[in-house]
Image (cartoon, helix red, strand yellow):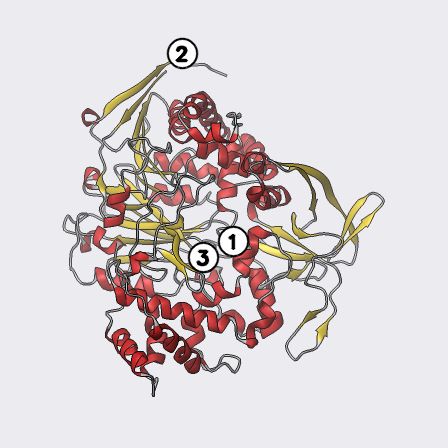
Amino acid sequence: MTTETYRDAWGIPHLRATSARELARAQGRVTAVDRAWQLEVERHRAQGTSASFLGAPALSWDVFARRARLDDTARRCFAALEGRDPETADWLRAYADGVNAGLAEGAARTPEFGRVGLAPGRWEPWTPLGVWLSTHILFAGFPAKLWRDEAIRHLGPDAVGLFATDGPGTAGSNGWLLSGTRTTTGLPLLAGDPHRFLEEPGVYQQIRLSCPEFDVVGLAVPGVPGTPHFAHTGSVAWSITNAMADYQDLYRERLRRTGAGVESLSPEGVWQRAVRRVEVVEVAGEGAVEVEVIETERGPVIAGGPEGLGGLEGTRVPGGRTEEVPPTAVALRYPPRVTEDLGFSALLPLLRARTVADVDRALDAWTEPVNVVQAADTTGAVLHRVAGRVPVRPRTNSLRVVPAWEKGHAWQGWHTPPHATLDDGMAVMANQRGPAAPLGVEFAPPHRAARIRALLEQRSAWSATDLPAIHTDTHLASAAPLLAHLAALTPLTPAATRLRDRLLAWNRHMDADSTEAAVYAALRTAVVRRLAAHPAFAVLTEPPAYPEVLLPWMSLTARIGFALEHLLAAEELYGIDRRGTVREALEEIAEAPPATPWSDTHRLAPWRALPEPPYPEPGLAGDHDCVNCTTAVPGITDLAARGPAARYVWDLNDRENSRWIVPFGADGVPGSPHHRDQLPLWLRGDLVRVVTDWTRLTLEHTDIAEEVHA
């Protein structure tokens, strides 16, 4: 068996092997060499052991991972996969073997291991499933149900619509598909960019995987074999966006301790034995913390316990009365925990796909996260569908936390994933309501999708070289309600009048060099903070004692910031004088308006597992509701911790005319030549060409071994 590792000019690995299994091993090995630190951080996060070397800041996640049973779910899914799909299970085993083969080399070139005294561990065949699960467990935004539960409890059911938005912790994407009728070559184009937390190293890995069965270029998730989300096989290409589907439920549980352990109250009024165990989480510099892990018939308890959850008892409700709530806990129900299937049986068929029909069949096995998929092939065929498992259950389950002891909240099978068609040769998905609308509650505002479609309609035919310009469009349609309030303000002080007139003349583009964009952002922040401080919302300023990892969804200021256009445009907002609020904010900003461009405060803020020596992080264009979705959190920070984690254009006429980019680079080692070499291009909106000609690549590593048969 022979495997070869090549590199292109950007250090992107191109792997060639004599079998799919050996290719998986090569992918694991090269990922460990390039991303050893990232892989080990993700493995420990999946196991709930990252605080053992990252210290107290990682404890909240580790406790959540233990209580949500992430590692146990990964093990169960792999055990079921071995019986149901032994080929894929063996493929995963080969990937883990490759990681183990490369970790020592990767760790030796990565300084973070020495900084924390961490030795590389061992990857098991189920570790990739654990990494996938821990990476995506929050994608459906189930903590939003905690927020909606509190908002409904205090403000009434109308709060659900008023605060609807893709909140601060939810990932999204842009994606668009053009049929051959809308391209210069007569064959389809796909393009887009996934919006995720910006991490260094990046959450996507550019890679090529070639063996006699397939030859695929795509974006891999480090720690997981294959290219699940974005890839081009030469004859078919696919990409995804977050469908914003709701496929996880939260149940409020009544628990009690007994001499034998813990029991939960069932919908039939019967106390049932719950699974209970105590686990120990090691914390660097602080010793160990015991974690009580409880699982009911609904699922793992992620918050509270038999003694209750502070802040929920005696909760105030609309009208000023007090509702007596007995001690409760919150359990999470999510599909892989129920089915012991994470959808990995789709991964090899995707790599082997030759047509959109092949992609369609492969994705019937998909589980989570639930995605909207776009695909096209070299015959001109196209595909636009939802993929993933969404349970059938009452609407109330989707809106808020439901009582486990009441009947009527059980899962009753699975929805059939919807398929959709193209409209005028185009399909555009940007997390707005679309084919997945029946499966979700909160979707992104339509601005990004509408803007992409409007830009695409400006030409009758597009080429692969034309499309990257759309990625970086900065028009901010969500500014309209705030600007409408400005236009109606009279009288104002002279300084406020001048500032208002500047903003009303502004082109509504969040360009990096725009001072008007900076002024708008400052005004928006002032309005958000005033609304968050209004007595009408005082009951939501102190969230219940939920785990720290869930608190971003409970931030009143962030919720107001992301839902500002809804709150300003609503007919009535709990008696708040919104125009007066905007006036006060304008007068405040007019006293000392920003004199520097938007990029001065709107800067890249990537997450790193360890604090690094400060890089001079660049300023950015764009904003949350722009196509160039570099997410500030209005009212809290102008820094962007979320944004395009990759950009791509897949050309079905000529794969070598395809292009891609990631925010930093192919190599996860600080200071290496390819650690941040793509950043200048990413900032400009440029993409690099995909290379598939082996003669233009540099051979780096050859591995020859005898084939071993089980």
**118 to the left or right of 110:** right
Q: Secondary structure at mark 1?
A: loop
Residue 616 has which mark?
none
Position of residue 214 relative to residue 266, above or below, is above
**23 to the left or right of 77:** left
Q: Residues within 10 Å of mark 2 (few under 14, many from 20)?
A: few
Q: Secondary structure at mark 3?
A: loop
Q: Which residue is mark 1?
A: 390
- Using the numbered discs, state the Cα–Cα distance from disc 1 to disc 3 in whole angstroms: 11 Å
Three-letter code, disc 2 = Glu
Residue 605 in the image, given as x and y percentages of width and height: 39, 49
Q: Residues within 10 Å of mark 1 (few under 14, many from 20)?
A: many
- Using the numbered discs, state the Cα–Cα distance from disc 2 to disc 1 in whole angstroms: 44 Å
Residue 244 has which mark?
3
If you read the primary sequence from the N terminus, does the residue marked by circle 1 or circle 3 appear first? 3
- Using the numbered discs, state the Cα–Cα distance from disc 3 to disc 2 in whole angstroms: 47 Å
**105 to the left or right of 519:** right
Three-letter code, disc 3 = Met
Task: Judge by depth and name the residue closer to the eye, 682 or 208.
Answer: 682
Task: Judge by depth and name the residue closer to the eye, 622 or 403.
Answer: 622
Q: Nearer the viewer, mark 2 or mark 1?
A: 2
Position of residue 388 relative to residue 526, above or below, is above
Q: Which residue is mark 2?
A: 706
Three-letter code, disc 1 = Val
